[in-house]
Amino acid sequence: MKIRDGSPGDASAMAELLNAIIAIGGTTAHQEPTTPAKVILHCIAGPDVRTSVVAVEGGEVIGWQAIEKWQGQMHIGSFVRPGIQARGVGSALFALTLARARALGIPEIIASIRADNVPGLAFYARMGFQDFAHDPDFALKDGTVVGRIHRRLTLV
């Protein structure tokens, strides 16, 4: 597995991966399929994107992570191909993301995680993120209340 910075050439594979996760449901607050253009704007090269990294194995993107300025804070998103989570891909991505964030002088990173996303909550806890706010009323578009937990990692 190789971890490297993401590029616009990765956008289609990144969108495909996120769309697969959305289709399964249960682990992302994203509910609408995305497009390569949206991935470029919000996760690779848009004006609010600070870092974008991908994990590549066998020439395929198997995971990606990005930090984007959203609502005045630096928010992280992490996505790993379904079926290979909990095998170190996220941790490997985070090592480069963290190095990039520190080099940019980002003081803290926010992860907003669905409260029912047990694997996501465990991942961010392992990376050192700590709870700072809860939104128990966060609901999906269909009205299903899943809650959301906001975690922060302070870098300075």
Image (spheres, rainbow, N blue to C red):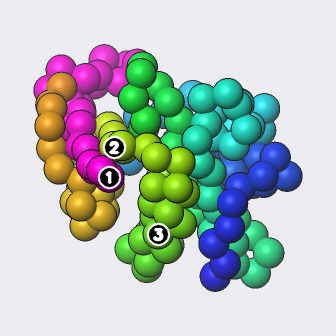
For label 1, the SS is loop
Q: Residues within 10 Å of mark 3 (few under 14, many from 20)?
A: few
Q: Are marks 3 and 2 in contact (CB under 8 Å)?
A: no
Quadrant in the picture for the N terminus:
bottom right
Does the magenta run of residues contain 148?
A: yes
In this rendering, the answer to whether 136 lies above or below 15 is above
Q: Residue at x 21, y 38 (%)?
A: 149
Residue 155: mark: 1
Reading the image, the residue beneath label 3 is: 95
Residue type (three-letter) at the residue carrying disc 1 = Leu
Span colored in magenta? 136-156
Q: How many marks?
A: 3
Q: x and y percent of residue 41 in the render?
A: 71, 31
Viewer-proximal residue among 85 and 48? 48
Give the Cα distance between marks 2 and 1.
5 Å
Which one is closest to the eye, mark 3 or mark 2? 2
Contact between labelled residues 1 and 3, with CB atoms less than 8 Å apart: no
- Picture residue at 18% right of the left edge, 20% below the top: 137
Task: Check residue 15 for magenta coloring.
Answer: no
Q: Position of residue 38 (x, y in %)?
A: 71, 30
- Judge by depth and name the residue closer to the eye, 139 or 121: 121
Within 10 Å of disc 1 (Cα), the crowding (few <14, some 14-19, many 20+) is: few
Is residue 76 placed above or below 48 in the rendered structure? below
Q: Is residue 27 left or right of residue 103?
A: left
Q: Secondary structure at mark 3?
A: helix
Reading the chain from its start, which is encountered first: label 3 or label 2? Answer: 3
The residue identified by callout 2 is 108
The amino acid marked with disc number 2 is: Glu
Q: Are marks 2 and 1 in contact (CB under 8 Å)?
A: yes
Identify the secondary structure beneath mark 2. Answer: strand
* Closer-to-camera residue (24/33): 33
